[in-house]
Each structure stands twice: as C-alpha cells, then as structure tokens.
Image (tube, grey):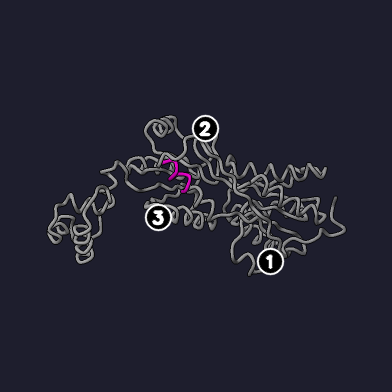
Amino acid sequence: MATIYDVGTRARVSVATVSSVINNSSYVSPELRQRVEAAIRELNYSPNLLARGLARQKTLTLGVLVPDIANFFYPELVRGVEDKAKEAGYTIILGSSDNQLSKEEVYLELFLSKRVDGIVLIKAPGEMSPALEQSLKKNGPPIVLLDREHPSLSADTVVADDFGGGRMAVRHLLDLGHKRIGIIRGVSGASTTEDRFRGYQTALDERHVPVHPDLIAEGDYGMDSGYVAGMALLRRKPTAVFVTNYMMTLGLLRAIEEQKLSCPKDISIVSYDDFIWSDIFPPRLTCVVQPKYMLGYKAAETLISRIQGKHKRPRREVLENRLQIRSSSIAAPRNAHR
C-alpha cells in the first residue's frame, strides 16, 4: 500500500508539499500540484483519514446508539444518519442498547474511548449513572437526542410529533364511530410511549369519550409483547385498537388470527410506523407515517453543525407525521358497545 512518502518520492517533492496538496492547507504552485496529483493517481494512494483527523484532534467518526437494530423502524433512521455523515466526511460506529441502561453505558463508554466527535443517541428509558453523565458533560463530545427526549440531558433534539401522531390516529377511529378504542403502549418511560399515549387520551377527552383503563395494554415495542397485549385486549372486546409501533401490530394481528377474528371486520387497527409491505399484504394497514430517514438525516446534520461550532443554543426540531388511511380501519359496527 502506497504511503505519503512514496507519493513525495514519485512526484519529486517533500512530504510537506504532498500534505499541502491533500489538505489544501497552503499554496502549492500549479506545476507541483499537478505532479503530486499525478503521483497519487499512479500509486492509487489513499490518505489515512484517521491520522489526518487525529492531527486535527478529530477522528471523523460519530457514535450512533439505537435501542434495537432488529426493529424495522431503525435501519432507515440509521441510513439517514449515515448518508449525512458521509456527505460531511464522517463515518459511524453503530451500537444497539436493547433498551437496557447497562448496555447503553457500555456503548457510551466505548464511544468515549474511541474519541468519537459526536454521538447520536436514542436514549434507553431511565437515568444513566451519575459518573457517566458527569463524564459526558465534562469531557464528552456533543450529543444529539434522536426520536426520544430525555430531560436530564441538555442536548440538541430531533424528534417526530408523537403526541400529534397519537392524537391523529385516535381521531381517525373516532371519526369512524368507534368508542371502545384500545391502545397497546410501548416501553414504559420512553418519551415516545408517553407522548403517543397522551395523544390517545387527548383525542378521547376532546370527544368526551371516557378512557377505559381495561382497554390500555402494556407492551415493549417488540412483536411478542404485541401478541400478549393483543390477546388480553381482545377479551375486553374493543372495536378498534391503536398500536403504538409496527412490531407490536404484527403481534396483535397474530392474536386476532388465533382468536378466529378478522381485521377490519371484527376489529379496526391503526398502527404507528409505515413500511412498504403495509400496503401489500392484507390487511392493508392504516398507519401514522413517520419521516424515518429524515429524522436520522436531520439528527446528523444538527450534530455536525454543533461539532463545527455553527450553533450554540440547544436546538429542538420536531418533524411532522401524516396519516395513511388504508383498509384496516372501517366504520364501527352499529351494535358496538358505547
């Protein structure tokens, strides 16, 4: 593999001149620049980006920590982060916390040891250890909170309008005449869970429909929890269910099939998150569509702006969702319990 010294020898110039051409850091005559660039092409030389970064006290890497990379929601989010990072000359180190504080701490300490220039963090529910929080505040790189907010961390934030999304989903079901509307919540303590649930409650309150505690089921954003919560809800006979993420919707659909019921004939569904197959396989799901890719892209954009010192005050950016109506939500049956 060619080195910067090989390039200098081939071009008959000093290493300093090669470095000036590569980094465009000082004036080099057109003749010398052409010789250096020709030597780089002939030797297929690739600059050591890590060494260049360390020389500038930068590693040109970003740490990205998500709750569960196996969840269909996160790959497109990470793609948005990665694409913006690449545009700006950064690479990413990706980790998955499984919504566990202990695993989150391992990754955050790894990011610190790798001297990443910034961190995109989807926070696990709960408080991080005081020692780690202090280390991040004193010595850590900039952090952007993505998807989930966390009050104890003063950081830039990029989120979707989860409250508005939950309210929009339940309003749609109310417009169809449903009154017994169940909900499957996500991970307790996550801002996404609480905001979507507030949207559910607000939509019902606005129409003077009582919130039935027996129609509130707890999940953890995983498919199995959607199945367990779905089996419990179906015994309580809702006419519709708002499911606060796609993986739990799959679990609910499995429960509906096992109970020999059908969607939407026996029960209407609105799911949070949309995917290409939501419009292909029956039932075609009515969904709250989140701008997944743009959430990731904006988070990386905000982080890089912070790293480059382009803004000082904390930013909070909220991206809008939209409702995609399909065949999984229909009018409530006339004999539905009121």
Query: Mark 2, residues whose alpha carbon is within 10 Å: few (<14), some, or many (≥20)?
Result: few
Q: Which residue is mark 1?
A: 283
Residue positioned 42% across, 32% down in the render:
137
Residue positioned 52% across, 45% down in the render:
146
Highlighted magenta segment, given as a residue range? 301-307
- Callout 1 amino acid: Pro
Q: Is residue 8 magenta?
A: no
Q: Quadrant of residue 22?
A: bottom left
CA distance separating discs 1 and 3: 38 Å
Residue 181 location in percent, x, y?
76, 51
- Callout 2 amino acid: Ser
Q: Which residue is mark 3?
A: 86
Q: Is residue 304 magenta?
A: yes
Q: Which residue is mark 2?
A: 152
Q: Compared with residue 257, is residue 91 higher up or lower down, i.e. above or below? A: above
Would residue 319 be found to the left or right of residue 45 on screen? right
